[in-house]
Image (cartoon, grey):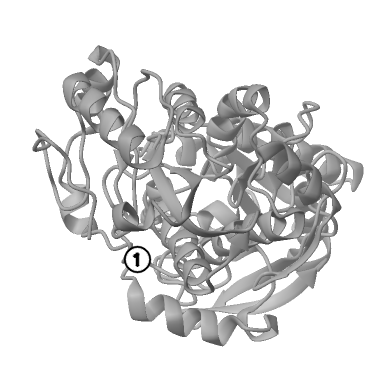
Amino acid sequence: MAVRLPFSPSRPRADFYLFTPHETAMYARTLRRLFGIVSRRTSGTATPVSARGRLNEHQHGGFMSASRSRRRILASAGGLLLATAARLAPAAAREQIVNIGFAGGFGVKLQSNLSFGARDGALLAVEEANQRNIVIGGKPVRFALLVVDDQSEPNFARIAANSFVAANVSGVIGHNTTDTSVAATPIYAEAGIPQISPTSTGRSFTSRGYRNVFQLLGHSDITANHLADITEQTIRARRVAVLDNATQLGQSLAEGYIARLRQAGMTIVARESVGGKSSDFSATLARIKAANPDLMFFTAVGPQVVALVQSHQRMGLDCKLLATGGGVNLEFPRTGLYPDGSYVLLHGLQVERRPGYAEFEKNYRRKYESALTAYTMFSYDAVGMLIDAMRRVDSTDPKLLTAELHRMQYRGISGPIAFAADGSQVNPPYTLYRAARDIWQQARTFGG
């Protein structure tokens, strides 16, 4: 039996709703009555997810423009939106409901939007945990994933964080970018809630002294070292053009990469930066082309990747491409628009080296339609590690979970996971792929 709300949401589309303040207040009262959730008024958007965890993403993509959504959110005095799994109402009397937050940037489903797969990886971990009949503190528990769309914007990330605090989550998986993760961290830290990001890789996420943050992927300083080594030893480039997307991660990664290249005696022939939402690279690539590089490194992510690679091809740049994890295409292991000879450095080990991956892939593809990417696996492991921490301390208290996460050595689908004192992962794995005959083929591995 699903939770029944005492109203009809004003703008339903598939399983996605944007609630008015009046609807939000009624929804919050319903949740408090059913589950004892203590909430406060805050603004945000979220994705209610059923126990089956399925969303029609094509309908979701046509739901509302980003600008209209922003106006609606900012005009709202309320807006705490929670997702509850079906059948929770009759179970509430005999089970403890444990809320886990998930924040990502959804909006329109565009090529290379990796948040959908990351969300569904988290959902799969929750569903599998609920099938194991876990007991914590002497009571059976049922986990519910609360999914919030922060639109990959720092201001909305803060809104999402306040919503999760109000919902009494035991931990948060997210956010999907370094900028949004950094924006939300102080709010989680004040509430003592552990924040595990399966996708944020900027060094700034774990370098600011917060004990509640955990970075499942290698941070940008480690990545920059590997990129410089790849440039010198594998690609053997001497003249390099560097392009970032004006985000915290992009700029810090680019500057770290440049510093290491200069130490190795290589020449930076062009240094460019574009806005995070730019899609016209003509002028930028014209300047890069005039500099005649051997290699162009870029930190574009999401739909920017498609536009950049298309422009590179159209303008006839005679240089190799080197990208990082955010540049992976949804067709992976097919190369999509990438020309042969391109390189991409991804977090994690190759599929064949991951124990348990075949079973994970089979279960995922049976339930979900979103693309299965490396971030799907990391998100699955983030939830699995958080739930394992609950079992170890026999509690859902966020402060106890934070302490346990620092102590744990967890073996996930992505490989062994352990955290340094600052929350960054110890010896994170990477794989370098080279495009050849329309397939990404393994070239090198690091760490792990």
Relative placement, left or right, of 347 versus 113 is right
The N terminus appears in which quarter of the rendering? bottom left
Relative placement, left or right, of 102 versus 93 is right
* Residue 74 appears anywhere in the view: yes
**Residue in front for this viewpoint, 446 or 316:** 446
Q: On screen, 408 above or below 298?
A: below
Q: On screen, 112 above or below 180?
A: below
Q: Position of residue 418 (x, y in %)?
A: 81, 57
Relative placement, left or right, of 73 versus 168 is left
**Residue in front for this viewpoint, 262 or 28:** 28
Q: Position of residue 210 (x, y in %)?
A: 76, 29
Quarter of the image where one finds residue 400: top right
Residue at horizontal 58 percent and vertical 71 percent from the top: 341
Residue at horizontal 68 percent and vertical 49 percent from the top: 395
Residue identified by numbered label 1: 370
Label 1: how many Cα within 10 Å (few below 14, some 14–19, many 20+): many
Residue at horizontal 76 percent and vertical 50 percent from the top: 405
Residue at horizontal 78 percent and vertical 46 percent from the top: 424
Q: Position of residue 175 (x, y in %)?
A: 53, 40
Q: On screen, 98 above or below 77?
A: below
Give the structural element (helix, strand or loop) at label 1. Answer: loop
* Residue 281 appears anywhere in the view: no
Relative placement, left or right, of 66 versus 309 is left
